[in-house]
Image (cartoon, rainbow, N blue to C red):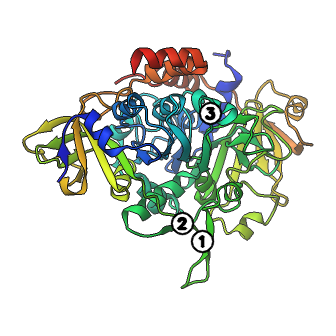
Amino acid sequence: MATIGPLADAIAELVGDGDTVAMEGFTHLIPFAAGHEVIRQRRRDLTLVRMTPDVIYDQLIGAGCASKLVFSWGGNPGVGSLHRFRDAVSNAWPAPLELEEHSHAGMANRYVAGASGLPFAVLRGYVGTDLIAQTPNIKAIVCPFTGEVLTAVPALRPDVTIIHAQRADRAGNVQMWGITGVQKEAVLAAKRSLVTVEEIVDELPPQPGAVVLPTWALTRVAHVPGGAHPSYAHGFSTRDNDFYVAWDAVSRERETFTKWLDENI
Amino acid sequence: MTDWTTDEMMTIAAARTLREGAVCFVGIGVPSTAANLARRTHAPNLVLIYESGTLGAKPDTLPLSIGDGILAETADAVISVPEVFNYWLQPGRVDIGFLAAAQIDEFANINTTVIGDDYRNPKVRLPGAGGAPEIAASCREVIVVVRQTRRAFVPRVDFITSVGFGRGAGDRERLGLLGSGPRCVITDLGILEPDPVTCALTLTKLHPGATIEAATAATGWDLAVADDVTTTAPPTDEELAILRMLEATKGRKQ
């Protein structure tokens, strides 16, 4: 059974220095408020895992929370580069950032393997690319039935996965819909999990196409309305595209970023 | 209407390459703009797949990201990200992969990872692979859209993020890649297509006002030029009007 309680308590209990942390949400339902709480609690030396480390990880990296990033695409979607991510990679500011780089197909399959209790996943991927030479855990594997050479990537097993969803009931069963990305797999792959939700209701109403995560598969649920902003929660808010566009200027220089951090987090 | 920019010409030329009814895997930026332009002009039944898991999206306004709400609201189906890559892309169900590039070389290999020779200490750190390596491998064909400059059109990309034709004819087959690779590269100056024998990119079309000299000068290798270079039809009033309407609504809240 998941414990329902305040966000700060959940982060204090679930996220420790040096942990491997996945915050997922594919453009939609990104757990920004939880990321900000990790910054406030000054976690350090985290291995951050995420398919698309966008603005949320730019903030965590710039705030000095991370020492390693496992990812497949690091940018501000539709806007441009992540300046804090770039500064960490190029100038080790505020701390050096080790990279482990994949493709989306590889990362998605690594979560599937983790959720499935398997040591690795098999896919047709990466062949002919220079990623293989830079990322040691992309390996060739021979199909035992056909002899075909395929690609293997190891399972992702985060210490904790954090996601945002639309609703939970009072028992801690979680319901989300719209673009649900890789969140189910990321939660089931992790040792511990936290879901922040827009609302807590007596009973989850039927919702076509919804993903339901049962309370017994989760560790913590926190009621955080608007917890995805500037990302969005389908049915509750729309994506604050102006924020993403404005982030480019805020994050470009260390001074403007630090000022933003001081004033807003 | 005679007044148009070379970027508008590039997007319109890209839209024209998309066949009515084709299934198209769309990245954000020019590919998304061009695909939505095609859907409003000659290809109303073009099927758009965005990697966020929106299958058959029909947005009224242009999304800023691959996961804007308008995509989920208008999709035939919203599916998980593992499903997009495993069930739909990997087995070869997608006709056209539509990619952008920071660097591209003579054999249409694409770099979106790092500029510079040293991966660990790059001159410029780019966003990385995203869905591109498997899109380039598994779609039946690939269309690339990129502005033509010496910085982007390099003899050899610093990092192969997505494979075009590798080091030349036969490489895709040797690597066991499912799709047939890049069909064309659309730039702000013209259109390049792989030579049927060598797979080297060859200038086959120029946009109105562009010259062979300009295209050659904007290419970092000795660009092959077809014997019969033709001129792209200029943008029509309808194409321009729809494109400008789309750009004006980009990322707009519904």
Residue reaching furthest to the left: A202
Badge 3 crowding class, 10 Å Cα cut-off, few under 14, some 14 to 19, many 20 or more, is: many
Q: Which mark is first along the chain, 2 or 3?
A: 3
Q: Which residue is mark 1?
A: A150
Who's the residue at 37% across and 23% down the image? B253
Same subunit: marks 3 and 2: yes
Pick the residue in front: A136 or B252: A136
Q: Nearer the viewer, mark 1 or mark 3?
A: 3
Q: CA distance from mark 3 to mark 2?
A: 31 Å
Q: Quadrant location of residue B252?
A: top left
Quadrant in which the N terminus of chain A is drawn: bottom left
Q: Amino acid at mark 3?
A: Ala
Q: Quadrant location of residue A253?
A: top right
Badge 2 crowding class, 10 Å Cα cut-off, few under 14, some 14 to 19, many 20 or more, is: some
Q: Which residue is mark 2?
A: A123
Is residue B143 shown left or right of residue A26?
Answer: right
Q: CA distance from mark 1 to mark 3?
A: 34 Å
Q: Which mark is first along the chain, 2 or 1?
A: 2
